[in-house]
Image (spheres, grey):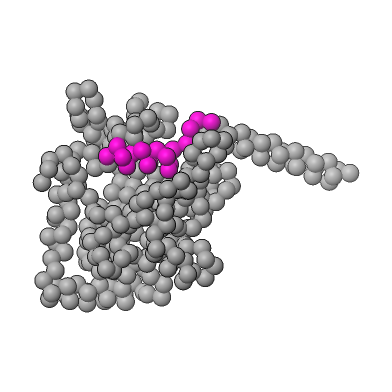
Amino acid sequence: MIKGLAITPPILGRISIGKVVEKNGKRVPEKDDQFTLTSQIQNKEGWVKHPLDEQLRAKASNQKLRSIPVRMIFNDPELNLRAEYSLFDRQTGRPVCMGNGETCQRMTNQGVEQHPCPSPDLCPLAQGGNCRPYGRLHVNLDESDELGTFIFRTTGFNSIRTLAARLAYYHAASNGLLSCLPLQLILRGKSTTQSYRQPVYYVDLTLREGVSLKEAIQTAQEIDQQAKAKGFNQQALDQMARQGYGNARFEVNSEEGVDVMEEFYTDESNVEQRQQNHDLTHVQDIQTGLQQSVQALN
């Protein structure tokens, strides 16, 4: 195996809850309220949709794809969901520093060095919002290719935290049979102070509709026994994936980093515009409140 090259699960397509659009001559990320499945090919209009997108969308009640049946390839939760604090070079997309909140691998003039990782809020290198959590969830959608994955990339705390919790809980509850559980990705929304009352969508992982936890565990046990009887070795598969991930200091390459920059990072003007919109809304709320007070006095 070539050293210094991370061996990651084969990717057949992408799962996204947004897209990149052109505004005022610039390509900027735009969030969506539904899933989109794409291939790994882009054209002038953006990412080309995967055939599975249309198939799943046809089954959706309102044509909006907000749930996707999935299967995990690995039993170990951390092999399915990869997440760390990540700092990329904004020009080249090259990974500069990646850490887990305790230690980090940092690219310097002397090569890759290990440093303490105090998290982005406390790290001098991370000031300016350039260091964010970056998660990659690998799931199987195509039964004809049981080791191929669709990848969901996110820099959102809500999605990463929720997915990490669900994977850990289902792994524990099923006695380690995570790869045999009938699961689905669903889209949830919530409003926060930082979102200025606008809904923020994030991804959750649940059991498929109509399946209880006890039923899912029983199904997982049956699938596990049948697979073992056929000679399938899930433990060896997990171990091989673990070795592949650890074959390089940086799991993410510059090519993926460029996509991350385009999909999740906005320039300062966009940040300023959002703040201006928030301030304007606040002023309008004050004006409305004053008008209501005057009317009440009259």
- Locate residue 212, reporting x and y percent: 36, 74
Q: Residue at x 51, y 35 (%)?
A: 26
Q: Nearer the viewer, residue 106 or 262?
A: 262
Direction front: furthest residue: 44
Q: Where on the picture, by quarter, is residue 251?
A: top left
Q: Main secondary structure of the magenta part?
A: helix
Vertical order, 74 against 250 (above or below): below
Vertical order, 79 against 54 (above or below): above
Question: Is 268 displayed left or right of 249 in the figure?
Answer: right
Direction right: furthest residue: 298
All told, the count of numbered labels is 0
Question: Is 195 displayed left or right of 158 in the figure?
Answer: right
Q: Is residue 260 magenta?
A: yes
Q: Is residue 118 magenta?
A: no
Q: Residue at x 25, y 31 (%)?
A: 106
The quadrant the C terminus occupies is: top right
Q: Where on the picture, by quarter, is residue 166?
A: bottom left
**Whether residue 8 can be seen here:** yes
- Locate residue 84, reporting x and y percent: 30, 42
Direction top: furthest residue: 109
- Locate residue 236, reporting x and y percent: 12, 60
Vertical order, 283 against 124 (above or below): below
Q: Residue at x 47, y 69 (%)?
A: 58
Magenta residues, start to end: 253-269
- Locate residue 293, reporting x and y percent: 80, 42
Q: Residue at x 27, y 73 (%)?
A: 217
**Whether residue 102 can be seen here:** no
